[in-house]
Image (cartoon, rainbow, N blue to C red):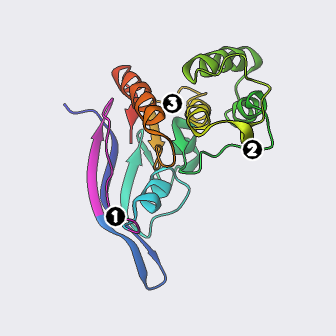
Amino acid sequence: MTDYVIEVKDLCKRFGAFTAVDQISFTVERGEIFGFLGANGAGKSTTIRMLCALLNSTSGHARVGGYDINHEPEKVKSSIGYMSQRFSLYDDLTIRENIEFFGGVYVLDHHRLKQQMEWVMRMADIRGQQDRLTRDLPGGWKQRLALGCALLHQPQIVFLDEPTGGVDPISRRNFWEIINQLSEQGITIF
């Protein structure tokens, strides 16, 4: 039996007369790295926002982690990690403050937040930099920090919206090495 963690059937999103997403259907298996490709304006980000329960669909159905995106949005949101194309970080906060902020969003207790902060600092290769302002970080560091913040609560499904845009080739390669390691641990990457 196949273990689908994302199931989409005839999903559609309209904004007035404009159809942004037109009856797409697909499934994603646990631990899969699922590449969602298309031209600019094809509806990729809109689809991701619907699957992250940030935007209701107009019609069709989708389940993420076993939860209906329109009827159980809070359960969807608490079970996934999401890294937007602009990294969702606060430039006027330090690295530590960004991690603490997202730890609060995910309601991590002090002990777990401390453990996860240490993990993010290692994974992002930014140990000893926790008091630097995020605005002063190179693009590759911001990218890894944003991924770490999306993974603080250890979700089994992670949505990445254009995660390697605007970073140098070495940072891009390092990022994909991290993504492959996460997939090997059974985390689904969309």
Q: Earlier in the sequence, mark 1 or mark 2?
A: 1
Q: Is residue 55 left or right of residue 57?
A: right
Q: What residue occupies the far left of the structure in this picture?
A: 1
From the image, state whether disc 1 or disc 3 is nearer to you. 1
Between discs 3 and 2, the one toward the N terminus: 2
| Circles 1 and 3: CB atoms closer than 8 Å | no
Give SS at disc 1: loop
Residue 70 in view of the camera: no
Q: Residue at x 69, y 35 (%)?
A: 102
Q: 152 or 164: nearer the eye? A: 164
* Residue that numbered label 1 is attached to: 39
At 75% from the left edge and 29% from the top edge, which residue is drawn?
Answer: 100
Task: Check the image and report above or below for 166 versus 144.
Answer: below
Q: Is residue 33 left or right of residue 132?
A: left
Q: Amino acid at mark 1?
A: Ala
Q: Which residue is mark 2?
A: 91
Determine crowd level at label 2: few under 14, some 14-19, many 20+ residues with C-alpha closer than 10 A. some
Label the magenta part by its dominant secondary structure.
loop
**The one of 169 and 100 positioned closer to us in this rendering:** 169
Q: Magenta region: which residues?
A: 24-41
Q: Mark 1 or mark 3: which comes first in sequence?
A: 1
User: In terms of image quadrants, where is residue 151?
Assistant: top right
Q: Position of residue 47 (x, y in %)?
A: 42, 59
Question: Can you tell which quarter of the image residue 44 is in?
Answer: bottom left
Q: Looking at the image, which residue is at 44% across and 36% down?
A: 172
Estimate the x, y position of residue 180 in percent, counting from the top left: 36, 26
Which residue is more in the foreground, 142 or 101?
A: 142
Vertical order, 165 against 103 (above or below)? below
* Res 155 label: 3
Q: Quadrant of the C terminus?
A: top left
Verify whether residue 72 appears in magenta: no
**Cα distance between the residues tagged 1 and 3:** 28 Å
